[in-house]
């Protein structure tokens, strides 16, 4: 039995900061996966990308990550542009990949499925329902809250949210995504609303301002841990979720899991690309 299975596209990214332009693999699934190189759980990544980008999968496998690939005609291509304040970015979508298929995922068993859609059509509500029959669902909501117009990404509501979220155990958003999802600018009101829709654990990240977790009627404030140096903020939320789900899988409480996750996200910022260091170093 797999402990944690992530489903999401690995992307071909262009990351532009005030200091550099970098070309690298990316996407929720990519950044979420690498911390599991050194975390003691049975982990599986299910992704979809074109044959031309299979070198990204080869690198994951070389680092000890088990990967199953659904064939796709294309790979998702994102352009992420950061201002001097790396809490904020502009995104462009240059190419799309095929959505994930229920038949392809039917044989896979896992205790927790972490879903990382990048765009609304990546993972259908029907697929969420099917996976919920087999394990707990953890969802990064960002992909359902994006609309692509002329290659640019804009925020939007998720029309199927009420239908889908009743099957979700753990939901991760940032403050802007939560506002788009609920219409509430107050994060605590928004978190309670999402919980009323059926979500058991609501995680709201806010970059350098830390995170807030709502579970069983209680709010847990998790501080951010300043990195020694800021090199690359891309994928910090995904790294956070890897640490959080790992700790929850191991039996940690919400506060312990959130604190470990925040420390891991801080470490990730200190180097470009996904986190490949020691998750337990001080």
Image: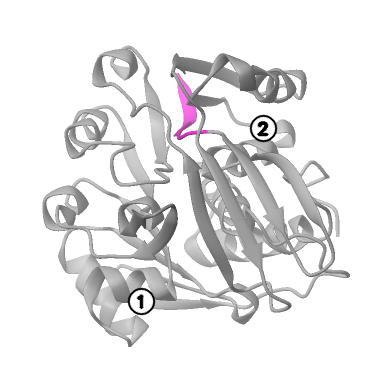
Residue at horizontal 25 percent and vertical 58 percent from the top: 199
- Residue farthest to the left, as pictured: 163
- Tell me if 14 is positioned left or right of 133 in this view: right
Q: Can you tell which quarter of the image residue 31 is in?
A: top right
| Residue positioned most to the front | 150
Decide whether residue 154 is among the magenta residues.
no
Q: Main secondary structure of the magenta part?
A: strand
Give SS at disc 1: strand
Vertical placement of residue 275 versus 181, above or below? above
- Mark 2 burial class by Cα count in 10 Å: few <14, some 14-19, many 20+: few
Q: Is residue 262 visible?
A: yes
* Range of residues picked out in magenta: 1-9
Which of 260 and 186 lies nearest the eye of the viewer? 186
The residue wearing badge 1 is 218
Residue 280 or 62: which is nearer the viewer?
Answer: 62
Q: Is residue 239 above or below residue 55?
A: below
Give the tally of numbered discs. Answer: 2
In which quadrant is the N terminus drawn? Answer: top left
| Residue matched to label 2 | 40
User: Residue 251, labelled with which disc?
Assistant: none
Q: In 3D space, how far apart are the residues under numbered discs 2 and 1 (Cα atoms)?
A: 29 Å
Residue found 21% across the figure and 29% down from its top:
133
Q: Residue at x 27, y 30 (%)?
A: 131
Check residue 3 for magenta coloring.
yes
Image location (x, y in percent) of residue 107:
32, 12
Q: Is residue 209 above or below residue 279?
A: below
Q: Residues within 10 Å of mark 1 (few under 14, many from 20)?
A: few
- Locate residue 79 relative to residue 220 in the image: left or right: right
């Amino acid at each position: 039995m797999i402990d944690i299975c992530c489903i999401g596209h690995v992307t071909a990214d262009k990351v532009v900061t005030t200091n550099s332009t970098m070309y690298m693999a990316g996407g929720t699934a990519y950044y979420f996966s690498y911390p599991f190189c050194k975390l003691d759980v049975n982990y599986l990544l299910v992704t979809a990308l074109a044959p031309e980008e299979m070198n990204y999968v080869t690198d994951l496998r070389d680092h000890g990550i088990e990967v199953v690939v659904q064939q796709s005609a294309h790979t998702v291509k994102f352009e992420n542009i950061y201002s001097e304040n790396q809490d904020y970015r502009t995104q462009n979508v240059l190419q799309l990949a095929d959505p994930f298929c229920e038949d392809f995922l039917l044989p896979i068993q896992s205790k927790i499925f972490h879903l990382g859609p990048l765009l609304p059509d990546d993972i259908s509500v029907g697929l969420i329902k099917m996976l919920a029959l087999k394990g707990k669902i953890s969802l990064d909501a960002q992909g359902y809250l994006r609309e692509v117009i002329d290659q640019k990404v804009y925020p939007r509501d998720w029309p199927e949210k009420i239908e889908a979220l009743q099957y979700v155990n753990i939901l991760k958003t940032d403050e802007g995504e939560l506002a788009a999802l609920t219409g509430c600018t107050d994060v605590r009101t928004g978190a309670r609303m999402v919980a009323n829709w059926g979500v058991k654990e609501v995680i709201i990240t806010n970059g350098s301002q830390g995170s807030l977790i709502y579970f069983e009627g209680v709010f847990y404030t998790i501080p951010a841990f300043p990195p020694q140096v800021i090199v690359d903020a891309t994928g910090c939320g995904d790294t956070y979720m890897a640490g959080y789900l790992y700790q929850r899988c191991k039996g940690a409480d919400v506060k312990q899991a959130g604190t470990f996750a925040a420390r891991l996200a801080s470490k990730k910022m200190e180097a470009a690309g996904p986190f490949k260091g020691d998750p337990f170093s001080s």
